[in-house]
Amino acid sequence: MIRSEQDFKNLYLQATEEWRRIEASMDPVVTVGTATCGRSAGSLEVLEALQESFRTKGVNGSIIEVGCIGLCYNEPLVTVLKSPKPAVFYGKITPKKANELVEKHVLGDTPVAEYALGSLGEEKIKGIPKLFDTSTLKPQVRRILRKCGIIDPTNILHSIAHEGYSGLMRAVQMDPQAIIQELKSSGLRGRGGAGFPTAMKWEFAVGQKSEKKFIICNADEGDPGAFMNRSVLESDPHSVLEGMSIAGYTIGAEEGYIYCRAEYPLALERLRISLGQAEEMGFIGDGILGTDFNFHIKIKEGAGAFVCGEETALIASIEGKRGMPTTRPPYPAISGLWGMPTIINNVETLASVSLIFQNSADWFSRCGTERSKGTKTFSLAGKVRNTGLIEVPLGITLREIIFEIGGGIPHDKQFKAVQTGGPSGGCIPKELLDTPVDYDSLKAAGSIMGSGGLVVMDEDTCMVDVARYFLDFTRKESCGECVPCRLGTKQMLDILNDITAGKGTPEDIDLLTELAEGVKLGSLCGLGQTAPNPVLTTIRYFRDEYEAHVNQKICPSRVCKALIHYRIIPEKCIGCQACFKICPVGAISGEPKKVHTIHQDVCIRCGLCYSTCPVKGNAIEILPGRPSKVEVKENG
Amino acid sequence: MDHRLQSIFAKYRGSRDEIIPLLQAVQEEYGFIPEDSMLEIARFTRVPESKIWGAATFYAQFRFTPMGENRVMVCRGTACHVKGASMILEEIERELGIKEGETTADGRYSLETVACIGCCSLAPCIMVNKKVEANMTPKKVAKIFKKGGTDDTQ
């Protein structure tokens, strides 16, 4: 139990000693990234292969499981460290390649440049770039993520060796007002999406006199296309617990909740382990760090409702009710959980609080713009080469993120738009690629910063279909409490379904805009107020696509099934019968070694033939619009 | 009250903030929420039964009918969507002969869609029991479900 600053200093020494033992170990150290992304790419099989290989080859060394460094496109990731040489990061490792690494690098002392992504540390290894000099990592500023994929998230000493809990140690020696001052001068704004100044939120709650107060960590990361919080919870859970403890101390709360979605089983598991360790050490519990401050945390599993990311709905859910929002004011900071003052902060906001007190407000605000300070994590996904988790200084442009860090669009396709802010955000077109990423600029572009999902779309993405997709999502997730959201999203979805089904009329576009404005103004909570954003931004920037759907009845991006058709290119078809065999409705005919034909009136446009065709460059093409009558007749 | 329910309740105090955790524990034990368990939760937490029904029916997680041995979840996240998730769903539906929200007649598979698994960088993906299958293609669907190798729950 840590009961004084001296105790903490001793613990820090012990932790750094343990960390140094790994870094300067005479025996080889191998780490494997086993966060959810790594696991889905097969990292557990790689881990097993490594363990097996260590056993059979009698290697004296250790294998450590770490979290996610964010280079998801290269999963599974393995690092080999043989001190004093720099550690080498390897990507796309299979069990077979893992064996090779053990033989060549672990036993043989020769790094395998072919699989290497880069090296860590000062010294340069021939043929391998320094990891943080590569174009993916160079523009990044890693603060929240600095421990992710480096430390073992289930070992609290690894966190402490990297300044973990030193922020709490400093905070509990400060006066709550001084903490608020420090937060204010850091300029931290809520990382959950809306960007409300964190210090102001806390200040409301400090001023409240109440027998009980609560801290809630919002880990209900529901935006489809966003996984930053999952990665942080899986890779560095202590940073969040520390932030909660600081928040509790500041506003005088003795109880905290972490509301994490049930779809994140590994994050929940690692949170539970970390919470146990923090309690054992005395960072959470009674008489924290020798003060008279008590703080306990409960972990709550969400039950699958997107609207529970909204703070009043989240509170209702913890209280055991249907997750429906209530009107604000009163704000939760005045009257929240069980009617008591409650602070709700997002995972990344709390991790940032830890950072501010581990370092300083001044250090924190060195990055960023005038009104958006610090760094922000984003999950980069969709039609971009280097998908993964990134952290950048606020104010960086979308172009830098997508084309430098992200490496551009794969398969030589054209960039079309980037979607920020999930179902509450919008699609930003090519012309606005130089928009700086900060709260205010994104808002001006019609989107929002959101929690940090960035989904890149290329020429093959249909913007009407994207709008329809988001409306389908918000319509399903609308809690049904207020009319504009419940009925408005339904009506908008109906119109979009019609347009994508080829039944749209030119008037539909204006009707859609009018409805969207109404839903935006009339809805009770953030879900409804922002649900029209995907529709409004796609109409604003891609009106021509809507017009092609309703006027010419074609889907220019060749996505909407009712407005496309497939055709076999006779010059390319080799008559292999692969498409003939896989077609589920028998719409393809043709004899072996002869050109095949698709019967347009039978074809259901499922795309199986297209994804099966073995011909280089594909012998099947997707064409915009329905086939002409002649084509149907010829092949029908 | 059956003893399975009793042993679940033994771990709780019966406070209102335990309603959803209790429903989750019941579902974990039975695979779904049996109707009479809601009355018992109501008694245990001293809340009207209607409120328990209200909460249980609000959240997507809760089911009121038994589920198949293997739970197949297709991600409908944004990244998965733009990378062809609907094609994957259709292919699974064809392969298993059921629609989203249904269970196969032999009780082997249940098929559902989820908002986002959070593996967006490896889209499109599906989750079979607790295992995530990444970078799905229609061809891979056939492979996974033909070999029937989905009994490994981890």
Image: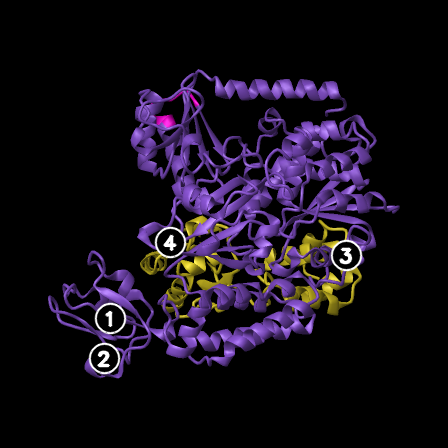
- In the structure shown, which secondary structural element does the residue marked by tag 3 occupy? helix
Q: Local crowd at mark 2 within 10 Å, few (<14), some, or many (≥20)?
A: some
Indicate the colour of chain B: yellow
Residue for badge 1: A567
Residue for badge 4: B149
Under mark 1, the amino acid is Arg
Q: Local crowd at mark 4 within 10 Å, few (<14), some, or many (≥20)?
A: few
Asked if residue A266 shows in the view, the reply is no
What's the chain of the residue with tag 4?
B
The answer to which quarter of the image holds residue A621 is: bottom left
The answer to which quarter of the image holds residue B5 is: bottom right
Q: Which mark is residue A631?
A: 2
Under mark 3, the amino acid is Arg
Q: Position of residue A529 (x, y in %)?
A: 65, 64
Check if residue A56 falls in the magenta segment. Answer: yes
Q: Are marks 2 and 3 in contact (CB under 8 Å)?
A: no
- In the structure shown, which secondary structural element does the residue marked by tag 1 occupy? strand
State the extent of the magenta-drawn residues as a range.
A54-61
Residues at marks 2 and 4, CA–CA distance in whole angstroms:
43 Å
